[in-house]
Image (cartoon, grey):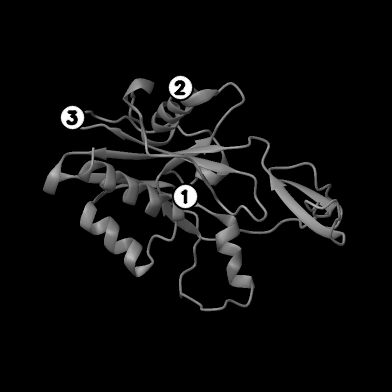
Amino acid sequence: MGGQIVTDLEVVDDFTSTGRCDEGFLHVRRLRVRNRHGDGTTSALYRVDVIDRPRLDAVAVLVHRGQGSELELLTRKNLRPAAYFRRLKAQTVPDGRSHLFCEEIVAGLLEPSDQGEDGVRSRAAEEVLEEAGYRVAPAEVVLLGPPFFVAPGIISEKIFLTAVDVTGRVGAPPQGDGSPLEEGGTLQWRTLASLEKAIEVGDIQDAKTELAVARFLRRAAHP
């Protein structure tokens, strides 16, 4: 987090035409499939692309402190190349934003060792320490309902939404994972009104953040 101020991304090499589709941060499976019907017939063959990550699922954590009118929610601004490079394409409705940095809640990939709900809670606690600088116990992490698909037509990933209360705790500078993608990242405590306004006007355009806030508020209203 912090460090150098990032103002742009430079594409040094575009190896799309030569890179294998089953390596890298995303794995793309290009399939030919057909539908099987109850009467034994099948549909015509058609192509399906399926995108997997090396780690199947992810966890997102709504870190919060205070209650009532004192409630505050923690967000991060992270470098997001895919969102940034949208500027090179014809956009349906241009929004006038660069999206070099996107504001969202703490999140990270689940590791193979993170099994079951206990594994989700453990990974959430690790991500809160790594990305936000707060040390919490896995047992303090609350699950905010079932996981959800990001884009089930093409992406296999599900995201598990969680929340954790850090009221009264002092956070340390987050260590991060050393990736260049974390350069220039910043943390911000927002009031509920501020966060909801940021979502309303499009300053925050991250689906998991909006859904996590909605589930958190619903849970608070109907514990």
Question: From mark 3 to mark 2, how far is it between C-alphas?
Answer: 25 Å
Q: Tell me where residue 133 appears, x and y as whole percent.
A: 36, 31
Q: Please report contact status of discs 2 and 1: CB closer than 8 Å, yes or no.
A: no
Residue at horizontal 67 percent and vertical 54 percent from the top: 154
Nearer to us in this view, 94 or 218 = 218
The circle on residue 25 is: none
Question: From mark 3 to mark 1, how far is it between C-alphas?
Answer: 26 Å
Q: Is residue 74 left or right of residue 153?
A: left
Query: Given this view, does label 3 or label 1 mark the residue nearer the observer?
Result: 3
Up-down relation of residue 53 to residue 214 (above or below): above
Residue type for callout 2: Asp
Q: Residue furthest left?
A: 69
Q: Tell me where residue 104 appears, x and y as whole percent.
A: 41, 50
Query: Given this view, does label 3 or label 2 mark the residue nearer the observer?
Result: 2
Residue type for callout 1: Asn
Q: Are there few (<14), some (14-19), or many (20+) residues within 10 Å of tag 1?
A: many
Q: Tell me where residue 63 appears, x and y as whole percent.
A: 32, 38
In this figure, which residue is indicated by the disc labeled 1? 78
In this figure, which residue is indicated by the disc labeled 3? 168
Q: Secondary structure at mark 3?
A: loop
Up-down relation of residue 85 to residue 59 (above or below): below
Q: Tell me where residue 26 appears, x and y as whole percent.
A: 70, 45
Q: Earlier in the sequence, mark 3 or mark 1?
A: 1
Residue at horizontal 55 percent and vertical 31 percent from the top: 110
In this figure, which residue is indicated by the disc labeled 2? 118
Q: Are there few (<14), some (14-19), or many (20+) residues within 10 Å of tag 3?
A: few
Q: Are there few (<14), some (14-19), or many (20+) residues within 10 Å of tag 2?
A: few
Up-down relation of residue 186 to residue 129 (above or below): below
Residue at horizontal 35 percent and vertical 28 percent from the top: 141
Residue type for callout 3: Gly
